[in-house]
Image: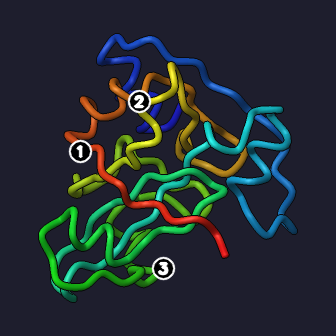
Amino acid sequence: MTPGIEIARKAGIEHTVHEYAHDPSSESYGLEAAEKLGVEKLRVFKTLVVSLDGRALAVGVLPVSAMLGMKRIARAAGAKKASMAAPAEVERVTGYVLGGVSPLGQKKRLRTFIDASAAAFQTIYVSAGRRGLEIELSPHDLKALTGASFAEIAQDAE
């Protein structure tokens, strides 16, 4: 049981937990999850933490096959600039290890932005709080549980 799963259970929302054997040599945790669970890449979402204007942190939840558009998330957050947060800071603030950061149950609740593409699906997959563990839930339930906004934050991977 992870804090992310506990939040979903306590809220009474419909969800399914999926576990798979994580390969430590995997380069992309999200793409590995999609492949091992047999789910299309557009329905598996990664959780990235960014620094806004070098002051506040925020979370972006986007398809594993896409890249986070820094200008897009900055605009969505009303900031001038966004950059990836330092890995040690991400782990300290969220309470999760990289590759297992869940948008649910973080130690400190951060402003969260879910890519608008999520709204097209009945359910999406996000990390449940550790490598090799995903939680499938409605994107609207994820939005409600995290206090998130839907925004166009993804850009095609180049």
For the rendered model, the colour scheme is rainbow
Between 26 and 42, the residue placed more toward the observer is 42
The residue that disc 1 covers is: 149
Which of the two discs, 3 and 1, labels the residue nearer the N terminus?
A: 3
Q: Are marks 3 and 2 in contact (CB under 8 Å)?
A: no
Q: Which amino acid does the dot numbered 1 rest on? A: Ser
Q: Which amino acid does the dot numbered 3 rest on? A: Pro
Between 137 and 91, the residue placed more toward the observer is 137
131 left or right, relative to 113: right
Query: Badge 2: how crowded within 10 Å, few (<14), some, or many (20+)?
Result: many
Could you tell me how far apart the alpha carbons at marks 3 and 2 are, in whole angstroms? 26 Å
Q: Are marks 1 and 2 in contact (CB under 8 Å)?
A: no
The residue that disc 3 covers is: 87
Residue 97 position in % (x across, y down): 55, 63
The residue that disc 2 covers is: 139
Residue 78 position in % (x across, y down): 12, 69
Q: Residue at x 60, y 49 (%)?
A: 130
Residue lying at the far bottom in this picture: please name it: 54
Between 7 and 140, the residue placed more toward the observer is 140
Could you tell me how far apart the alpha carbons at marks 1 and 2 are, in whole angstroms? 11 Å
Residue 61 position in % (x across, y down): 43, 52
Q: If the image is split into quadrants, where does the C terminus sit?
A: bottom right
Residue 145 position in % (x across, y down): 27, 31
Of circles 3 and 1, the one toward us is 1
Q: Secondary structure at mark 2?
A: helix
Q: Which amino acid does the dot numbered 2 rest on? A: Pro
Query: Badge 3: how crowded within 10 Å, few (<14), some, or many (20+)?
Result: few
